[in-house]
């Protein structure tokens, strides 16, 4: 009886290895879902910034009767002068560069190009007619049948 009472209680090495294996399996399942959620959140920031830039383009049009000249230095294309050129707007970590891809007297095309750790996600585009496109394949072009992004 005394030998049973004096025995120390604890976990065996096998039990600890099983717990570590279970935690590893759970992490392997959860991490891709987490990463997908982070990517979607960053993409939403890019979409919001493009919508904000589109609003700035409309204000520019109201003042100047043209979409031209809204880029840096009064140019028609390039980094916007009328709106921040990176997104998200409220963070020090920027995941998109915002540019005016095309602008004339009556129309514009805006682009959010991913950068940094988000670089492989494909660019987002928004036009003055409200067309929203996403280069989901990240091949540098909007392919036929490719996803249009939703609000």
Image (spheres, grey):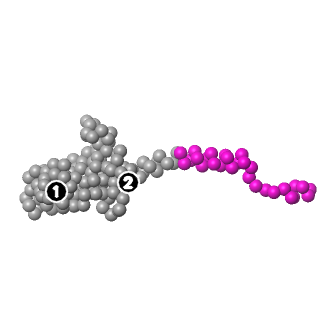
As drawn, is 136 to the left or to the right of 4?
left
Q: Residue furthest top?
A: 144
User: Helix, strand or loop at disc 1?
Assistant: loop
Q: Which residue is mark 1?
A: 71
In this rendering, the answer to whether 93 lies above or below 120 is below
User: In this view of the protein, which residue sits in the foreground, 43 or 139?
Assistant: 139
- Residue 103: percent from left, percent from top: 13, 51
Indicate the position of residue 41 as horizontal and vertical percent values.
38, 54
Is residue 15 part of the magenta span, yes or no? yes
Q: Residues within 10 Å of mark 2 (few under 14, many from 20)?
A: few
In the displayed structure image, the side of residue 134 where residue 33 appears, left or right: right
Q: Which residues are magenta?
A: 1-28
Q: Please tell me whether residue 97 belongs to the stretch shown in magenta.
A: no
Q: Main secondary structure of the magenta part?
A: helix
Where residue 139 sits in the image (x, y, percent)?
30, 38
Q: Residue furthest front?
A: 73
Q: Are marks 1 and 2 in contact (CB under 8 Å)?
A: no
Give the CA distance from mark 1 to mark 2.
27 Å
Disc 2 target residue: 41
Of label 1 and label 2, which has the lower sequence position? Answer: 2
Q: Residue at x 7, y 58 (%)?
A: 65
Q: Nearer the viewer, mark 1 or mark 2?
A: 1
Q: Badge 1, how many Cα within 10 Å: few under 14, some, many 20+?
A: many
Quarter where residue 90 is shown: bottom left
Q: Please tell me whether mark 2 sits on a helix, a strand or a loop.
A: helix
Which residue is at 11% across, 61% downward? 62
Q: Is residue 38 visible?
A: yes
Q: Residue at x 25, y 58 (%)?
A: 85
Total count of labels: 2
Residue at the image point whose x is 74% and y is 49% from the top: 12
């Amino acid at each position: 009886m005394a030998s049973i009472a004096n025995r120390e209680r604890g976990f065996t090495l096998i039990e600890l290895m099983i717990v570590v294996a279970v935690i590893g399996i759970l992490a392997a399942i959860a991490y891709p879902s987490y990463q997908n959620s982070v990517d979607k959140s960053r993409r939403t920031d890019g979409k919001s910034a493009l919508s904000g830039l589109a609003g700035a383009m409309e204000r520019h049009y109201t003042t100047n009767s043209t979409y031209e000249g809204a880029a840096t230095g009064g140019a028609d294309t390039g980094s916007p002068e009328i709106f921040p050129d990176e997104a998200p707007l409220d963070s020090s970590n920027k995941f998109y560069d915002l540019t005016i891809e095309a602008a004339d007297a009556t129309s514009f095309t805006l682009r959010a190009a991913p950068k940094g750790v988000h670089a492989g996600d494909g660019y987002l585009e928004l036009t003055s007619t409200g067309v929203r496109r996403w280069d989901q394949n990240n091949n540098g072009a909007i392919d036929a049948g490719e996803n249009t992004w939703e609000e």
